[in-house]
Image (tube, helix red, strand yellow):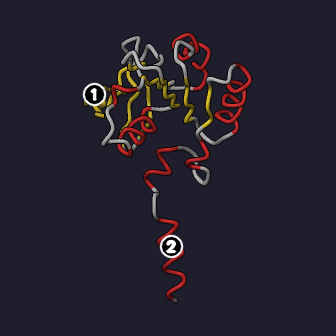
Amino acid sequence: MQEVRYAINGKEYFAIGFKNDAGGYELRNPYSKLSSSPKDITTIKNNAPKDIVFEGFMDFLSFVSIHKNEPVSNRDFVVLNSVSFFEKARPFMEQHEVIHLYLDRVSTGHNYSQYALSLSPKYKHESSLYKHHKNINYWVVNFGKLRHKKQGQKLH
């Protein structure tokens, strides 16, 4: 991950850039969610038996943050950068003994998870962890807010 500066219509911007396997970037700043060409998947290869799959890099970063005391090297990762790259990522994913799917809890992510489960028992659907949120990133960002809100209501 790195800071990326780019221009649109002659105006300069900057964003967090998450590099993909083809040399393009997923770009995020408070105002926009963009990609540079070429768009592709991002794989992090540690020759591990487990693979963890995310739709976007913010989900990957959230996962790493909640597992900060565990070594990253004991698993491989795929950030699809779009669920439309699921098939492209399958050869890499299926090299692993277990494939943990942390896809979004919207119809497209759910459909791809169901499809993957129909392909092989190696796929594991992990979205129950964040069952009340769109994805793992929203769950991490909002962790504890619902509990505090309920506690606050009891006090009144």
Residue pushed farthest right?
118
Residue marked by disc 2: 149
Measured from the top left, where is residue 64 in percent x and y?
Answer: 37, 38
Q: Is residue 148 left or right of residue 98?
A: left
Q: In which quarter of the image is residue 8?
A: top left
Image quadrant in which the N terminus is located:
top left
Measured from the top left, where is residue 38 in percent x and y?
Answer: 44, 13
Depth check, front residue: 6 or 71: 71
Q: Which of marks 2 and 1 is in front?
A: 2
Which residue: 38% across, 17% down?
45
Which residue: 50% across, 69% down?
147
Residue marked by disc 1: 4
Q: Is residue 149 visible?
A: yes
The Cα–Cα distance between marks 2 and 1, rounded to whole angstroms, is 38 Å
Depth check, front residue: 131 or 120: 120
Which residue: 42% across, 22% down?
76
Which residue: 34% across, 30% down?
72
Circle 2 Cα neighbour tier, 10 Å, few/some/many (<14 / 14–19 / ≥20) = few
Q: In this view, does 97 lie to the left or right of 47?
A: right
Report helix, strand or loop for mark 1: strand
Q: Is residue 9 visible?
A: no
Q: Which amino acid does label 1 sit on?
A: Val
